[in-house]
Image (cartoon, rainbow, N blue to C red):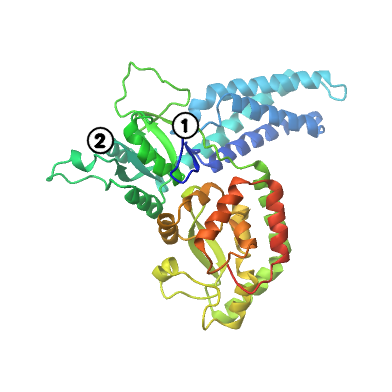
Amino acid sequence: MVVSQRTAHGSRLTLSGGPAWGHSTRTLLLAADSTAALLATAALPSVQRQPLLVTGFVLLVLALHRSAGLYRPVEGRHVLDDCPALAGRVVLAWCVLTAAAASLPLLQPLSPRAVLTGCAAHGALAVTARAFVLWRRRVALVRRPCATLLVGPEPTAARVAAALQRHRPSGIRLVGIVGADAAGSRTESEEPTLPVLTSVDDVRRAVIQNGVRRAIVLGNSSAPEHRPWLHSLAELRCEFWELDPDPSAYVPARHAADSHLAGFRCRPLSAAADRLHPGKRALDLAVSATLLVLISPVLLVCALWLRLSEGPGVVFRQERVGRGGRPFTLLKFRTHRPADPIESATRWSVANEHHMPWFCRFLRRTSLDELLQLWNVFRGDMSLVGPRPERPYFVMKFSETYPGYSERHRMPTGITGLAQINGLRGDTSIEDRCRFDNAYIDSWSLWRDLTILLRTATEFFRPTGS
């Protein structure tokens, strides 16, 4: 269910859940199914000589699998659960391929033996590949669980939390309980099993410091007591799940998306409305890949010079906050060395650092130190155009000070943006940056990204760093 309303500052707000799997698992499943289909047709020379027919066959397989929900996120999915739907779709796809081969004049009809062999090989390859992808997903959930908040009364939340913590494959790392009456429902002698967050500031701090990506609502998400907390969490771009803390064997599933988490019936709320236009990601991939190849000699020269003049540690890695409040590791050439990690995370560095070697000053003044972020763009951590990413400490600080700052995370962060081409770089007004960043997101278009990139290219050499 989607709950739409407006914030105190007038911006539209939609409480909605994001993809529980993330894009990587779905992409790997698509790749596994495509590869299985291609390899299964490799033993058919007449078909392999028709690339359009092979492409159509692969697309048909993917479309049939999608219609069966084989790419829909389901927590705890096992390959055996998919076998009936998988087998039926594979057989149907091969029936269509056989009919096409028999009707096209340039192809020889496929023999029954070839069809049976290809169909069996296709099914075996698909099951094997999908089993590996889903196994990898389960391992990742255990090793890197999703930081999560429980929204609801503490007694119920404590019971659900204990069950989730006993069931490690759920992939949940609970960091707190959100609820106005949570503290009041506990006696003085009782110790909370998890931190109890009873104010909006506590919630915001917990989300940013722990990298919270999901909020599980206990009971009906439309209940009035949940609305203020969901409103605050939605501004921080959390995913939302609804969990029934008291499941009954006699109550049927209410929604097609219902699944189970540690035995509790749950479901993701409606998919996020702020979906990225596919053209933006395609532009990012094309430009970043091309530039990485073209400027690789420049990157190599900069890296060698820094290594010889400044010693080891050429690449500077720092945690930044990206789309939806998710942290990622930003890459830059190291131009100065903070005294310690605390200084690196909390010091507001400006462009003209004192006592910086001339080559490091050159890198910062020309923004050559930022070129490694093209790898962040290629990986999908960032975009070419978008609000500049900031450190978690400053995200929390600015979100409390400047209205609408957290709304910047509706869009992937970028190397350049509307604020930057308007001179808002380095030690400039955060309020102005926030306003320009939100204006860019509200009026986004692919053409606007192109114009910002062209304007950035003309101003590449500038007197201040970012």
Q: Callout 2, which amino acid?
A: Arg
Q: How many labels does the image show?
A: 2
Mark identifier at residue 2? 1
Residue 411 visible? The answer is yes
Q: Which of 397 and 72 is in front in this view?
A: 397
Q: Callout 1, which amino acid?
A: Val
Horizontal side of residue 448 vs 104, given as left or right? left
| x and y percentages locating residue 222 in the rendered image | 38, 29
Q: Residue beneath label 2, please?
A: 159
Q: Nearer the viewer, residue 333 or 165?
A: 333
Q: In which quarter of the image is the N terminus?
A: top left
Task: Tell me if mark 1 has few (under 14), some (14-19) or many (20+) residues whose alpha carbon lies within 10 angstroms of its own.
Answer: some
SS for callout 1: loop
In this rendering, the answer to whether 123 lies above or below 463 is: above
**Residue occupying the point 30% across, 29% down:** 245
| x and y percentages locating residue 91 in the rendered image | 64, 20
What separation in Å lies between label 2 and label 1 (alpha carbons)? Answer: 27 Å
Horizontal side of residue 154 vs 318, given as left or right? left
The quarter of the displayed image where residue 302 is located: bottom right
Outermost residue on the left side: it is: 189
| x and y percentages locating residue 107 in the rendered image | 84, 24
SS for callout 2: helix
**Residue occupying the point 21% across, 45% down:** 192
Mark identifier at residue 262? none
Task: Tell me if mark 2 has few (under 14), some (14-19) or many (20+) residues whose alpha carbon lies within 10 angstroms of its own.
Answer: few
Residue 413 visible? The answer is no
**Residue occupying the point 38% across, 55% down:** 209
Q: Which mark sits nearer the N-terminus, 2 or 1?
A: 1
Q: In which quarter of the image is the C terminus?
A: bottom right
In this rendering, the answer to whether 87 lies above or below 419 is: above
Outermost residue on the right side: it is: 105
